[in-house]
Image (cartoon, rainbow, N blue to C red):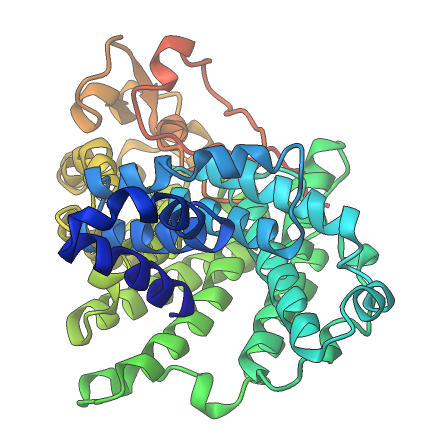
Amino acid sequence: MTTLERVYACLEPIKHNPCLQGRSATAAAATLFNSDTDKLKIVIAIGRTLDTGGKDDQAQRLFQSTTGSVEGLLWNSNGISGIQLLVLAALYHYHLDEEVRTGRIIGFAARLCLEMGLHRRLTIDKTFPNTNDRLIALEAFCSVYMLERRTGLGQGIPYTIQDSYIDPALFAMDDANPMLGHLLKWTRLAGKTWQVLNSNGENGVETEVENLDYLDFMIKKWYHELPDNLKLDVVQLARPDPQQSSTYHQAVFLLRQDHLRNLIFRPVLQSASHITQHERHASSAVEIAQNSITALSALHKHTHLVTSHPLFFKHLLLTAFVNLLLSVVHACRVFWPVVREEFDSALDLIEQLSGQSAPMMRLWQRVCGLRELPRRLDQMPRFDECGLNDSELGLNPEFVLSLEEFFPGLSTKFSLPMLDLAQLVEYNSDAAGPGSGSGPPLDPSIIGNHFSLPLMDYQFS
Protein backbone atom coordinates (compact mmCIF):
# COMPACT_ATOMS: atom_id res chain seq x y z
CA MET A 1 0.00 0.00 0.00
CA THR A 2 2.86 2.37 0.70
CA THR A 3 4.18 1.88 -2.84
CA LEU A 4 0.70 2.40 -4.28
CA GLU A 5 0.27 5.63 -2.33
CA ARG A 6 3.61 6.92 -3.63
CA VAL A 7 2.61 6.17 -7.21
CA TYR A 8 -0.71 7.99 -6.85
CA ALA A 9 0.96 10.92 -5.11
CA CYS A 10 3.31 11.23 -8.08
CA LEU A 11 0.74 10.83 -10.86
CA GLU A 12 -2.23 12.77 -9.52
CA PRO A 13 -0.64 16.27 -9.78
CA ILE A 14 0.50 15.55 -13.36
CA LYS A 15 -2.97 14.31 -14.29
CA HIS A 16 -4.70 17.50 -13.14
CA ASN A 17 -1.98 19.96 -14.21
CA PRO A 18 -0.25 19.02 -17.50
CA CYS A 19 2.13 21.94 -17.07
CA LEU A 20 3.91 19.95 -14.38
CA GLN A 21 4.77 17.06 -16.71
CA GLY A 22 8.22 18.29 -17.67
CA ARG A 23 9.29 19.31 -14.19
CA SER A 24 7.90 16.13 -12.62
CA ALA A 25 9.35 13.72 -15.18
CA THR A 26 12.45 12.96 -13.13
CA ALA A 27 10.50 12.41 -9.92
CA ALA A 28 7.94 10.27 -11.75
CA ALA A 29 10.65 8.10 -13.28
CA ALA A 30 12.20 7.51 -9.87
CA THR A 31 8.81 6.54 -8.48
CA LEU A 32 7.57 4.39 -11.36
CA PHE A 33 10.76 2.51 -12.18
CA ASN A 34 12.14 0.84 -9.06
CA SER A 35 11.97 -2.59 -7.49
CA ASP A 36 8.98 -1.79 -5.27
CA THR A 37 6.94 -0.51 -8.20
CA ASP A 38 7.97 -3.53 -10.28
CA LYS A 39 6.61 -5.81 -7.59
CA LEU A 40 3.38 -3.81 -7.49
CA LYS A 41 3.03 -4.14 -11.26
CA ILE A 42 3.37 -7.91 -11.12
CA VAL A 43 0.87 -8.16 -8.25
CA ILE A 44 -1.65 -6.21 -10.34
CA ALA A 45 -0.82 -8.37 -13.38
CA ILE A 46 -1.52 -11.51 -11.36
CA GLY A 47 -4.82 -10.04 -10.17
CA ARG A 48 -5.83 -9.20 -13.73
CA THR A 49 -4.87 -12.70 -14.85
CA LEU A 50 -7.02 -14.25 -12.13
CA ASP A 51 -9.97 -12.00 -12.99
CA THR A 52 -9.86 -12.85 -16.69
CA GLY A 53 -9.01 -16.54 -16.27
CA GLY A 54 -6.02 -16.41 -18.59
CA LYS A 55 -3.80 -14.09 -20.57
CA ASP A 56 -4.83 -10.45 -20.38
CA ASP A 57 -3.32 -7.70 -22.56
CA GLN A 58 -3.09 -5.19 -19.74
CA ALA A 59 -1.54 -7.78 -17.43
CA GLN A 60 0.99 -8.73 -20.10
CA ARG A 61 1.99 -5.10 -20.64
CA LEU A 62 2.44 -4.59 -16.91
CA PHE A 63 4.58 -7.70 -16.61
CA GLN A 64 6.64 -6.92 -19.70
CA SER A 65 7.53 -3.54 -18.21
CA THR A 66 9.29 -5.42 -15.40
CA THR A 67 11.20 -7.97 -17.49
CA GLY A 68 14.31 -5.78 -17.63
CA SER A 69 14.50 -5.75 -13.85
CA VAL A 70 13.83 -9.48 -13.61
CA GLU A 71 16.50 -10.35 -16.19
CA GLY A 72 18.94 -7.95 -14.54
CA LEU A 73 18.89 -10.15 -11.44
CA LEU A 74 21.15 -12.55 -13.34
CA TRP A 75 23.96 -10.05 -12.81
CA ASN A 76 22.87 -8.31 -9.62
CA SER A 77 20.74 -10.19 -7.11
CA ASN A 78 19.52 -7.00 -5.38
CA GLY A 79 19.16 -8.77 -2.05
CA ILE A 80 15.81 -9.80 -0.59
CA SER A 81 13.95 -7.42 -2.89
CA GLY A 82 15.31 -9.27 -5.92
CA ILE A 83 14.20 -12.63 -4.52
CA GLN A 84 10.73 -11.23 -3.85
CA LEU A 85 10.56 -10.00 -7.44
CA LEU A 86 11.52 -13.44 -8.75
CA VAL A 87 8.86 -15.12 -6.60
CA LEU A 88 6.20 -12.79 -7.99
CA ALA A 89 7.43 -13.36 -11.55
CA ALA A 90 7.22 -17.12 -11.00
CA LEU A 91 3.71 -16.78 -9.59
CA TYR A 92 2.64 -14.76 -12.62
CA HIS A 93 3.71 -17.58 -14.94
CA TYR A 94 2.15 -20.11 -12.56
CA HIS A 95 -1.24 -18.43 -12.95
CA LEU A 96 -0.81 -18.65 -16.71
CA ASP A 97 -0.24 -22.40 -16.27
CA GLU A 98 3.29 -22.02 -17.65
CA GLU A 99 4.95 -24.50 -15.32
CA VAL A 100 8.27 -24.72 -17.12
CA ARG A 101 8.87 -20.98 -16.84
CA THR A 102 7.64 -21.04 -13.26
CA GLY A 103 10.16 -23.75 -12.43
CA ARG A 104 13.05 -21.97 -14.14
CA ILE A 105 12.44 -18.67 -12.37
CA ILE A 106 11.88 -20.15 -8.92
CA GLY A 107 14.90 -22.42 -9.41
CA PHE A 108 17.03 -19.33 -10.01
CA ALA A 109 15.54 -17.72 -6.90
CA ALA A 110 16.47 -20.85 -4.92
CA ARG A 111 20.06 -20.56 -6.12
CA LEU A 112 20.17 -16.92 -4.96
CA CYS A 113 18.80 -17.94 -1.55
CA LEU A 114 21.64 -20.39 -1.09
CA GLU A 115 24.20 -17.85 -2.28
CA MET A 116 22.92 -15.36 0.30
CA GLY A 117 22.95 -18.00 3.04
CA LEU A 118 19.25 -17.66 3.78
CA HIS A 119 19.13 -21.36 4.63
CA ARG A 120 21.28 -20.71 7.73
CA ARG A 121 19.90 -18.96 10.78
CA LEU A 122 23.29 -17.61 11.84
CA THR A 123 23.72 -15.91 8.47
CA ILE A 124 20.28 -14.31 8.67
CA ASP A 125 20.94 -13.08 12.21
CA LYS A 126 24.22 -11.46 11.15
CA THR A 127 22.97 -10.02 7.87
CA PHE A 128 19.69 -8.63 9.21
CA PRO A 129 20.10 -7.17 12.70
CA ASN A 130 16.57 -5.75 12.63
CA THR A 131 13.90 -8.24 13.73
CA ASN A 132 11.43 -7.16 11.06
CA ASP A 133 14.07 -7.47 8.33
CA ARG A 134 14.90 -10.97 9.54
CA LEU A 135 11.26 -12.03 9.31
CA ILE A 136 10.99 -10.58 5.80
CA ALA A 137 14.08 -12.53 4.76
CA LEU A 138 12.69 -15.71 6.31
CA GLU A 139 9.35 -15.25 4.54
CA ALA A 140 11.14 -14.79 1.22
CA PHE A 141 13.14 -17.98 1.77
CA CYS A 142 10.04 -19.96 2.79
CA SER A 143 8.19 -18.77 -0.31
CA VAL A 144 11.02 -19.93 -2.56
CA TYR A 145 11.48 -23.19 -0.66
CA MET A 146 7.81 -24.18 -0.91
CA LEU A 147 7.21 -23.05 -4.48
CA GLU A 148 10.39 -24.68 -5.77
CA ARG A 149 9.48 -27.95 -4.07
CA ARG A 150 6.00 -27.86 -5.60
CA THR A 151 7.32 -27.21 -9.11
CA GLY A 152 9.99 -29.88 -8.68
CA LEU A 153 7.36 -32.36 -7.57
CA GLY A 154 5.17 -31.39 -10.48
CA GLN A 155 7.82 -31.64 -13.18
CA GLY A 156 9.90 -34.47 -11.76
CA ILE A 157 12.96 -32.19 -11.78
CA PRO A 158 15.46 -32.21 -8.87
CA TYR A 159 15.08 -29.24 -6.57
CA THR A 160 17.93 -26.98 -5.51
CA ILE A 161 17.17 -26.44 -1.81
CA GLN A 162 17.65 -29.84 -0.20
CA ASP A 163 16.27 -30.38 3.30
CA SER A 164 19.73 -31.39 4.48
CA TYR A 165 21.00 -27.89 3.62
CA ILE A 166 18.55 -26.10 5.89
CA ASP A 167 19.44 -25.16 9.44
CA PRO A 168 17.01 -27.07 11.74
CA ALA A 169 16.64 -23.91 13.85
CA LEU A 170 15.75 -21.69 10.89
CA PHE A 171 11.99 -22.13 10.82
CA ALA A 172 11.74 -21.65 14.59
CA MET A 173 12.47 -17.95 14.03
CA ASP A 174 8.83 -17.28 13.19
CA ASP A 175 6.39 -19.20 15.37
CA ALA A 176 3.66 -16.57 15.09
CA ASN A 177 2.21 -18.21 11.98
CA PRO A 178 1.29 -21.83 12.78
CA MET A 179 -0.24 -22.33 9.33
CA LEU A 180 3.16 -21.65 7.77
CA GLY A 181 4.73 -24.27 10.01
CA HIS A 182 2.28 -26.92 8.84
CA LEU A 183 2.91 -26.04 5.19
CA LEU A 184 6.65 -26.30 5.73
CA LYS A 185 6.18 -29.81 7.13
CA TRP A 186 4.15 -30.71 4.06
CA THR A 187 6.94 -29.34 1.89
CA ARG A 188 9.41 -31.74 3.50
CA LEU A 189 7.00 -34.61 2.87
CA ALA A 190 6.74 -33.49 -0.75
CA GLY A 191 10.51 -33.81 -0.96
CA LYS A 192 10.37 -37.36 0.37
CA THR A 193 7.66 -38.12 -2.17
CA TRP A 194 9.86 -36.82 -4.96
CA GLN A 195 12.72 -39.03 -3.78
CA VAL A 196 10.57 -42.16 -3.75
CA LEU A 197 8.95 -41.51 -7.12
CA ASN A 198 12.01 -40.35 -9.02
CA SER A 199 15.44 -41.15 -7.60
CA ASN A 200 14.86 -44.84 -6.98
CA GLY A 201 13.16 -45.46 -10.30
CA GLU A 202 15.75 -43.61 -12.35
CA ASN A 203 18.63 -45.42 -10.69
CA GLY A 204 17.06 -48.79 -11.34
CA VAL A 205 16.66 -49.51 -7.63
CA GLU A 206 13.67 -51.55 -6.66
CA THR A 207 10.97 -49.48 -5.00
CA GLU A 208 9.57 -51.43 -2.09
CA VAL A 209 5.91 -51.05 -1.24
CA GLU A 210 6.96 -50.79 2.40
CA ASN A 211 8.50 -47.43 1.56
CA LEU A 212 5.20 -46.31 0.09
CA ASP A 213 3.35 -47.53 3.16
CA TYR A 214 5.65 -45.64 5.50
CA LEU A 215 5.43 -42.44 3.48
CA ASP A 216 1.64 -42.76 3.37
CA PHE A 217 1.65 -43.18 7.15
CA MET A 218 3.73 -40.01 7.55
CA ILE A 219 1.40 -38.02 5.30
CA LYS A 220 -1.70 -39.17 7.18
CA LYS A 221 0.04 -38.43 10.48
CA TRP A 222 0.82 -34.89 9.29
CA TYR A 223 -2.84 -34.28 8.49
CA HIS A 224 -4.05 -35.91 11.71
CA GLU A 225 -1.86 -33.59 13.78
CA LEU A 226 -3.34 -30.45 12.22
CA PRO A 227 -5.61 -28.41 14.50
CA ASP A 228 -9.30 -29.04 13.95
CA ASN A 229 -9.85 -25.59 12.44
CA LEU A 230 -7.57 -26.58 9.53
CA LYS A 231 -9.31 -29.88 8.76
CA LEU A 232 -12.09 -30.09 6.21
CA ASP A 233 -15.21 -32.14 6.88
CA VAL A 234 -16.60 -32.84 3.43
CA VAL A 235 -19.99 -33.79 4.89
CA GLN A 236 -20.28 -30.37 6.56
CA LEU A 237 -19.82 -28.53 3.26
CA ALA A 238 -23.55 -28.73 2.56
CA ARG A 239 -24.22 -26.51 5.57
CA PRO A 240 -23.98 -22.75 5.01
CA ASP A 241 -20.66 -21.36 6.17
CA PRO A 242 -20.18 -17.59 6.04
CA GLN A 243 -16.41 -17.93 6.40
CA GLN A 244 -15.30 -19.01 2.95
CA SER A 245 -11.70 -18.15 3.82
CA SER A 246 -11.57 -20.78 6.56
CA THR A 247 -13.08 -23.36 4.21
CA TYR A 248 -10.43 -22.49 1.65
CA HIS A 249 -7.62 -23.06 4.14
CA GLN A 250 -9.18 -26.35 5.19
CA ALA A 251 -9.51 -27.41 1.57
CA VAL A 252 -5.87 -26.53 0.90
CA PHE A 253 -4.62 -28.84 3.64
CA LEU A 254 -6.94 -31.71 2.72
CA LEU A 255 -5.98 -31.51 -0.93
CA ARG A 256 -2.29 -31.26 -0.07
CA GLN A 257 -2.62 -34.58 1.75
CA ASP A 258 -4.60 -36.22 -1.04
CA HIS A 259 -2.24 -34.94 -3.72
CA LEU A 260 0.78 -36.67 -2.17
CA ARG A 261 -1.14 -39.84 -1.40
CA ASN A 262 -2.35 -40.09 -4.99
CA LEU A 263 1.20 -39.67 -6.23
CA ILE A 264 2.91 -42.21 -4.00
CA PHE A 265 0.49 -45.01 -4.89
CA ARG A 266 0.47 -44.38 -8.63
CA PRO A 267 3.33 -46.84 -9.35
CA VAL A 268 1.15 -49.78 -8.32
CA LEU A 269 -1.37 -48.80 -11.01
CA GLN A 270 1.08 -48.50 -13.86
CA SER A 271 0.55 -52.02 -15.20
CA ALA A 272 -1.77 -54.97 -14.86
CA SER A 273 1.04 -57.06 -13.38
CA HIS A 274 1.71 -54.50 -10.65
CA ILE A 275 -1.98 -54.38 -9.79
CA THR A 276 -2.06 -58.17 -9.57
CA GLN A 277 1.04 -58.28 -7.35
CA HIS A 278 -0.15 -55.50 -5.05
CA GLU A 279 -3.92 -55.76 -4.95
CA ARG A 280 -4.26 -54.12 -1.53
CA HIS A 281 -2.18 -51.11 -2.53
CA ALA A 282 -3.98 -50.81 -5.85
CA SER A 283 -7.32 -50.78 -4.06
CA SER A 284 -5.98 -48.13 -1.69
CA ALA A 285 -4.81 -46.03 -4.64
CA VAL A 286 -8.23 -46.19 -6.25
CA GLU A 287 -10.00 -45.39 -2.99
CA ILE A 288 -7.77 -42.34 -2.41
CA ALA A 289 -8.49 -41.11 -5.94
CA GLN A 290 -12.22 -41.62 -5.45
CA ASN A 291 -12.20 -39.70 -2.17
CA SER A 292 -10.25 -36.88 -3.80
CA ILE A 293 -12.76 -36.53 -6.64
CA THR A 294 -15.64 -36.67 -4.15
CA ALA A 295 -14.11 -33.88 -2.06
CA LEU A 296 -13.52 -31.72 -5.14
CA SER A 297 -17.08 -32.30 -6.35
CA ALA A 298 -18.47 -31.29 -2.96
CA LEU A 299 -16.30 -28.17 -2.89
CA HIS A 300 -17.46 -27.25 -6.37
CA LYS A 301 -21.11 -27.86 -5.52
CA HIS A 302 -21.27 -26.00 -2.21
CA THR A 303 -18.61 -23.28 -2.56
CA HIS A 304 -17.09 -21.01 -5.19
CA LEU A 305 -13.54 -22.02 -4.32
CA VAL A 306 -12.93 -24.40 -7.21
CA THR A 307 -14.15 -21.94 -9.84
CA SER A 308 -12.23 -19.04 -8.30
CA HIS A 309 -8.97 -21.03 -8.05
CA PRO A 310 -9.18 -23.43 -11.02
CA LEU A 311 -5.43 -23.88 -11.50
CA PHE A 312 -4.81 -24.72 -7.85
CA PHE A 313 -7.51 -27.39 -7.75
CA LYS A 314 -6.58 -28.65 -11.21
CA HIS A 315 -3.48 -30.36 -9.87
CA LEU A 316 -5.31 -32.65 -7.47
CA LEU A 317 -8.16 -33.16 -9.93
CA LEU A 318 -5.84 -34.49 -12.62
CA THR A 319 -3.64 -36.44 -10.23
CA ALA A 320 -6.69 -38.32 -8.97
CA PHE A 321 -8.25 -38.60 -12.43
CA VAL A 322 -5.11 -40.11 -13.96
CA ASN A 323 -5.05 -42.74 -11.21
CA LEU A 324 -8.66 -43.63 -12.00
CA LEU A 325 -7.79 -43.83 -15.69
CA LEU A 326 -4.81 -46.08 -15.01
CA SER A 327 -6.95 -48.39 -12.90
CA VAL A 328 -9.52 -48.67 -15.69
CA VAL A 329 -6.89 -49.16 -18.37
CA HIS A 330 -4.98 -51.88 -16.56
CA ALA A 331 -7.72 -53.61 -14.55
CA CYS A 332 -11.01 -52.70 -16.19
CA ARG A 333 -12.88 -55.77 -14.96
CA VAL A 334 -11.92 -55.04 -11.36
CA PHE A 335 -12.20 -51.27 -11.12
CA TRP A 336 -14.55 -49.92 -13.80
CA PRO A 337 -17.78 -50.80 -11.95
CA VAL A 338 -16.29 -49.22 -8.83
CA VAL A 339 -14.92 -45.96 -10.24
CA ARG A 340 -17.44 -45.12 -12.95
CA GLU A 341 -19.26 -42.47 -10.90
CA GLU A 342 -16.06 -40.67 -9.89
CA PHE A 343 -14.68 -40.99 -13.43
CA ASP A 344 -17.72 -39.17 -14.79
CA SER A 345 -17.57 -36.61 -11.98
CA ALA A 346 -13.94 -35.82 -12.78
CA LEU A 347 -14.74 -35.26 -16.45
CA ASP A 348 -17.69 -33.07 -15.42
CA LEU A 349 -15.39 -30.95 -13.26
CA ILE A 350 -12.83 -30.54 -16.03
CA GLU A 351 -15.56 -29.54 -18.48
CA GLN A 352 -17.13 -27.05 -16.08
CA LEU A 353 -13.79 -25.50 -15.19
CA SER A 354 -12.90 -25.20 -18.86
CA GLY A 355 -15.07 -22.10 -18.98
CA GLN A 356 -13.18 -20.51 -16.11
CA SER A 357 -9.69 -20.35 -17.57
CA ALA A 358 -7.88 -20.78 -20.85
CA PRO A 359 -5.54 -23.52 -19.51
CA MET A 360 -8.51 -25.57 -18.36
CA MET A 361 -10.15 -25.07 -21.77
CA ARG A 362 -7.05 -26.44 -23.48
CA LEU A 363 -7.07 -29.36 -21.09
CA TRP A 364 -10.71 -30.15 -21.77
CA GLN A 365 -10.14 -30.07 -25.52
CA ARG A 366 -7.49 -32.75 -25.06
CA VAL A 367 -9.41 -35.13 -22.81
CA CYS A 368 -13.01 -34.63 -23.95
CA GLY A 369 -12.67 -37.76 -26.08
CA LEU A 370 -12.68 -39.81 -22.89
CA ARG A 371 -16.42 -39.14 -22.68
CA GLU A 372 -16.73 -42.05 -25.08
CA LEU A 373 -14.76 -44.44 -22.88
CA PRO A 374 -17.74 -45.60 -20.76
CA ARG A 375 -19.79 -46.35 -23.88
CA ARG A 376 -16.96 -48.31 -25.47
CA LEU A 377 -16.32 -50.27 -22.31
CA ASP A 378 -20.00 -51.09 -21.93
CA GLN A 379 -20.13 -52.36 -25.52
CA MET A 380 -17.17 -54.67 -25.10
CA PRO A 381 -17.84 -58.34 -24.37
CA ARG A 382 -17.40 -59.41 -20.81
CA PHE A 383 -13.87 -60.60 -20.14
CA ASP A 384 -14.93 -63.83 -18.52
CA GLU A 385 -17.16 -64.64 -21.52
CA CYS A 386 -14.13 -64.35 -23.80
CA GLY A 387 -12.12 -66.68 -21.62
CA LEU A 388 -9.37 -64.07 -21.21
CA ASN A 389 -7.36 -63.19 -18.19
CA ASP A 390 -5.90 -59.74 -17.50
CA SER A 391 -2.51 -60.59 -18.97
CA GLU A 392 -4.14 -61.53 -22.30
CA LEU A 393 -6.32 -58.44 -22.43
CA GLY A 394 -3.91 -56.22 -24.33
CA LEU A 395 -3.17 -58.88 -26.96
CA ASN A 396 -6.71 -59.51 -28.16
CA PRO A 397 -8.15 -57.38 -30.99
CA GLU A 398 -11.49 -57.26 -29.20
CA PHE A 399 -9.93 -54.96 -26.62
CA VAL A 400 -8.05 -52.52 -28.83
CA LEU A 401 -9.19 -48.88 -28.56
CA SER A 402 -8.78 -46.39 -31.39
CA LEU A 403 -6.88 -43.34 -30.18
CA GLU A 404 -8.56 -40.99 -32.65
CA GLU A 405 -11.93 -41.74 -31.13
CA PHE A 406 -10.82 -40.44 -27.74
CA PHE A 407 -8.24 -37.83 -28.79
CA PRO A 408 -9.49 -36.01 -31.90
CA GLY A 409 -6.85 -34.24 -33.93
CA LEU A 410 -4.10 -36.82 -33.77
CA SER A 411 -2.37 -36.75 -37.13
CA THR A 412 -1.36 -40.41 -37.21
CA LYS A 413 -3.85 -43.25 -37.31
CA PHE A 414 -3.04 -46.18 -35.15
CA SER A 415 -4.50 -48.21 -32.33
CA LEU A 416 -3.04 -49.38 -29.09
CA PRO A 417 -4.27 -51.93 -26.61
CA MET A 418 -6.18 -50.68 -23.61
CA LEU A 419 -3.04 -51.52 -21.68
CA ASP A 420 -1.28 -48.57 -23.32
CA LEU A 421 -4.10 -46.05 -23.49
CA ALA A 422 -2.80 -44.15 -20.48
CA GLN A 423 0.36 -43.31 -22.41
CA LEU A 424 -1.69 -40.78 -24.31
CA VAL A 425 -2.62 -38.76 -21.26
CA GLU A 426 0.44 -36.87 -20.14
CA TYR A 427 0.06 -34.61 -17.13
CA ASN A 428 3.42 -33.05 -16.32
CA SER A 429 2.20 -31.70 -12.99
CA ASP A 430 2.85 -35.02 -11.31
CA ALA A 431 6.02 -36.35 -9.85
CA ALA A 432 6.44 -38.89 -12.56
CA GLY A 433 9.89 -38.54 -13.94
CA PRO A 434 10.91 -40.09 -17.22
CA GLY A 435 9.33 -43.36 -18.11
CA SER A 436 8.17 -45.50 -20.94
CA GLY A 437 5.12 -47.58 -21.61
CA SER A 438 4.97 -51.25 -22.30
CA GLY A 439 3.50 -50.96 -25.80
CA PRO A 440 4.71 -49.67 -29.17
CA PRO A 441 6.62 -46.38 -29.08
CA LEU A 442 4.70 -43.24 -29.95
CA ASP A 443 5.59 -41.12 -32.95
CA PRO A 444 7.53 -38.12 -31.53
CA SER A 445 5.59 -35.79 -33.82
CA ILE A 446 2.42 -36.71 -31.97
CA ILE A 447 3.65 -36.14 -28.45
CA GLY A 448 3.09 -32.39 -28.53
CA ASN A 449 -0.45 -32.70 -29.90
CA HIS A 450 -2.12 -34.57 -27.10
CA PHE A 451 -2.38 -34.72 -23.36
CA SER A 452 -0.13 -37.54 -22.16
CA LEU A 453 0.87 -39.00 -18.84
CA PRO A 454 4.51 -39.93 -18.26
CA LEU A 455 4.21 -43.41 -16.86
CA MET A 456 6.76 -44.53 -14.34
CA ASP A 457 8.86 -47.64 -14.70
CA TYR A 458 9.18 -49.07 -11.21
CA GLN A 459 9.93 -52.53 -9.94
CA PHE A 460 8.48 -53.72 -6.69
CA SER A 461 9.88 -56.30 -4.38
Name the foreground residue: 109 vs 215.
109
Q: In the picture, which quadrant includes the C terminus?
A: top right
**Left or right: 216 as drawn, with respect to 298:** right
Pick the front one: 40 or 391: 40
Relative side of 368 to 395, left or right: left
- Can see residue 329? yes
User: Is 72 positioned to the left or the right of 161 in the image?
Assistant: left
Q: Can you give x and y, in whole percent of width and height, for residue 182 in the image? A: 59, 76
Q: Quadrant of residue 362?
A: top left
Q: Is residue 276 above or below residue 366?
A: below
Reply above or below: 96 against 145. above
Return the residue nearer the eye: 16 or 289.
16
Q: Indicate the position of residue 371 as horizontal and vertical percent values.
A: 15, 40
Q: Which quarter of the rendered picture does the N terminus lie within?
A: bottom left
Write down the quadrant of residue 401 in the picture.
top left
- Tell whether 281 sits left or right of 127: left
Q: Residue at x 34, y 50 (%)?
A: 321
Residue 367, placed above or below residue 228: above
Measuring 41% from the left and 28% from the top, which residue is drawn there?
423
Q: Residue at x 40, y 50 (%)?
A: 27
Tell me which residue sits at (80%, 55%) in the image: 117
Q: Quadrant of residue 26?
A: top left
Q: Position of residue 52 (x, y in %)?
A: 17, 49
